[in-house]
Each structure stands twice: as C-alpha cells, then as structure tokens.
Image (cartoon, grey):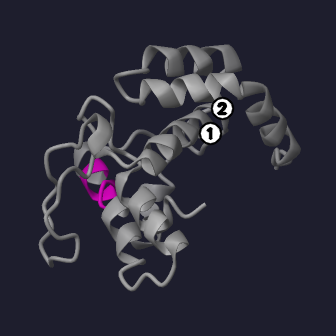
Amino acid sequence: MLHDLGKVGISDAILRKPGKLDDQEFAIMKFHCILGARFFENSTSDLDVISAEIALNHHERWDGRGYPGKIENIYDNQVQLGVGKIAGEIPISARMVALADVYDALVSRRAYKEPFPEEQTLEIIKTDSARHFDPEVVDAFFAIYEVIVAIREKYQEEPS
C-alpha cells in the first residue's frame, strides 16, 4: 500500500493529468520513488525497512531499464537518477510489487485510460517476463492467478 507514498510530493497537475506525461513531467514523476523511500529514513521496524525498499525500487526493471537506478545517497539535496538496477540487484520485495503494480494499473480504470481486458493484461505480463519482470515472480503470479482474481473481485471499487 505504501509503494507510491512519494506521490504526495508530486504536483496534482502531473498526477491527475488526463493524457500522457511529457518528458519533463515524467522526469519529475520518477522522483516519487526517492521521495517515498525518504519517508522511512528513521525506520523503527522491519515493515519500515521493506516499505522503503519497495518505494525506492518498484519501478526498476529486470532488464535494467527502470528507475530511479543506482543512487549513492537518496538524501542528497541534488539526487541524480542512476543507471537502472538489474535482475538480482533489485530487492525481491520490489520485484513482486512491480508486477502487482503493473497488473493493477492495466486492469484498472485511470484518469488517462480505460481498463485493459484481462487477456491482454496477462499477455503483456507474459511478454514482459525477463524484460520488465523477474521470470520467477511471473511464474509465481500465474501459479496463484485465481487467488489474485478472487482478491481483486472482493475489493473491486464500485463505479462512480
């Protein structure tokens, strides 16, 4: 639930934009990972530690093309995004959330898009195995897919 906590530091003009973000807006959006991890600077529990790990790394990609990348100190005043983390450099917690986050984004209605059909969503996940997602996490996702659907249906938001 806390993976996108850093979005509180991103302008609503970007967060609620109905269309695609331009390059400058997307560059700003990438910093939500760093902002989210910073909330847990004074961690007092294992949950805080894993929450920071997930917030920082949930947009890293298995193939190294994600963000925010390798950063020496996320608390620097002038943080620069680094070269993407690759495969096992990404904490397993963030690899799991990356898949869950993309699945949710695809099957859900957003201000900028309609929900994707389930079949198309599953095909995207399969295609992005070993590119965007850890292949073992993809295998685990499909092994418990019926449970995931049941949970999603139980907590489905009512149309507004």
- Residue 23: numbered disc: none
Asked whether, in this view, residue 109 is left or right of residue 4, the answer is right
Three-letter residue code for mark 2: Val
- Asked if disc 1 and disc 2 are in contact, CB closer than 8 Å, the reply is yes
* Residue 29 is a magenta residue: yes
Magenta residues: mostly which secondary structure? helix
Residue at horizontal 43%, vertical 45%?
A: 92
Q: Name the residue carrying label 1.
A: 104
Please identify the quarter of the rendering in which residue 90 is found.
top left
Residue 41's place in the image compared with 87, above or below, is below
Q: How many marks?
A: 2
* Residue 80 is a magenta residue: no
* Residue 62 or residue 1, whichever sits in front: 62
Please identify the quarter of the rendering in which residue 42 is found.
bottom left
Residue 65's place in the image compared with 91, above or below, is above
Q: Where is the N terminus found, in terms of image quarters? A: bottom right
Residue 147's place in the image compared with 11, above or below, is above
**Dot 1 crowding, Cα within 10 Å, few <14, some 14–19, many 20+:** some
Residue at horizontal 35%, vertical 59%?
A: 56
Residue 41's place in the image compared with 49, above or below, is below
